[in-house]
Image (cartoon, rainbow, N blue to C red):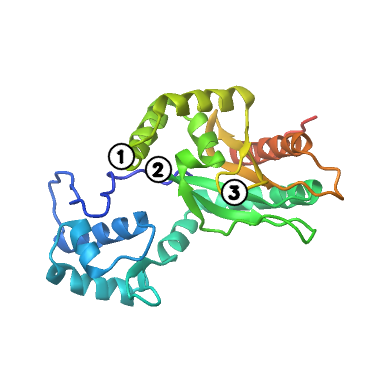
Amino acid sequence: MLLPPGPTRACQGDVVEKPTSKYRAPALDKGLDILELLASAHKPLSIVEISDGVGRSRGEIFRMLQVLEERDYIARAEGDGGYCITPRLFRLAMEQPPVRNAIEAALPVMHRLAETTEQACHLVVPSRDQIVVIARADPPGEIALVVRIGHRRPMSQSTSGHVLLAFQEEQVREHWLDLIAAQEADLDRKKLGRQLAQVRSQGHACARSHVVDAVIDLSAPVLDHGRAVCTVTVPFIEHRASGQTPERTIEALCKATAEISDILQYGAVTQRQ
């Protein structure tokens, strides 16, 4: 279920440091360097920026860019002609059995949750130092905050990410925090640690949205032997005509994630009061 961590990405302008390996495939190295750089970028990158980012000459990467574009792994952005990564890798990852199983188990429960709470909800998994949305369920009404599938955010800056971090074995959590710290020089690790301890104690997270004012993010873990493999998150919006409250929504959310956890672990639903 977890998307495996790889070597730390280089920031734009840094030379990528490759681990020592017994076997080398230079062309594959170049292609992977480019994909990892574009995956971490927050805007399309020019050939010069890609060249600087992977520490290779423009001549070395020119043909590689052409091949990656022809295979639909990268595309030219409109306007300035810079390159950005396409959803192709994301679609390939969604075909993996653990991911498919999680989506198949979660979606029926999520649709019931959306109908009961009159709120949208989405399923989130970790991807290195980020979170990524892999499924969603929309409520029956006309008003809701809907997060698109494929949306990414830094793990440290999202309620879903805090839940994923809080419900991990210490070794995994520390590794993820190292990845986050490599990308965020101003990360307050002690403060984040206190927040994670509170989330674990509560069994869920409830916080003001990092992105949208007047939205409260409610998130609870889907667990496999005490470890969060994904989360379900509700971006709660108060409706004047609705009797739903954050407290009632959290209760419904936690029941839903417990049900999904049971399905993933045992293939059946345990009756919960």
Residue at 80% of width from left, 59% of height from top? 141
Horizontal side, residue 42 vs residue 68: left or right: right
Between the C-alphas of marks 2 and 3, the distance is: 17 Å
Using the image, determine if residue 43 lies above or below residue 8. below
* Image depth: mark 2 or mark 3 in front: 2
Residue at 31% of width from left, 45% of height from top? 6
Which is nearer the N-term, disc 3 or disc 1?
A: 3
Q: In this rendered view, identify the residue nearer to me: 106 or 132.
A: 132
> Which x, y percent locates residue 70?
32, 77
Extreme front residue here? 213
Using the image, determine if residue 107 lies above or below residue 45. above
* Image depth: mark 2 or mark 1 in front: 1
> Which x, y percent locates residue 38?
33, 60
SS at circle 1: helix
Between the C-alphas of marks 3 and 1, the distance is: 26 Å
Residue at 33% of width from left, 34% of height from top? 178
The disc labelled 2 sits on which kind of residue? Answer: Asp
Residue at 19% of width from left, 59% of height from top? 52
Between the C-alphas of marks 2 and 1, the distance is: 9 Å
The disc labelled 3 sits on which kind of residue? Answer: Leu
Which is nearer the N-term, disc 2 or disc 3?
A: 3
> Pointers 3 and 1 in contact (CB under 8 A)?
no
* Residue for badge 2: 129
* Residue for badge 3: 123
* Image depth: mark 3 or mark 1 in front: 1
SS at circle 3: strand
Q: Quadrant of residue 137?
A: bottom right
> Which x, y percent locates residue 43?
38, 62
* Residue for badge 1: 182
What quarter of the picture does the C terminus occupy?
top right
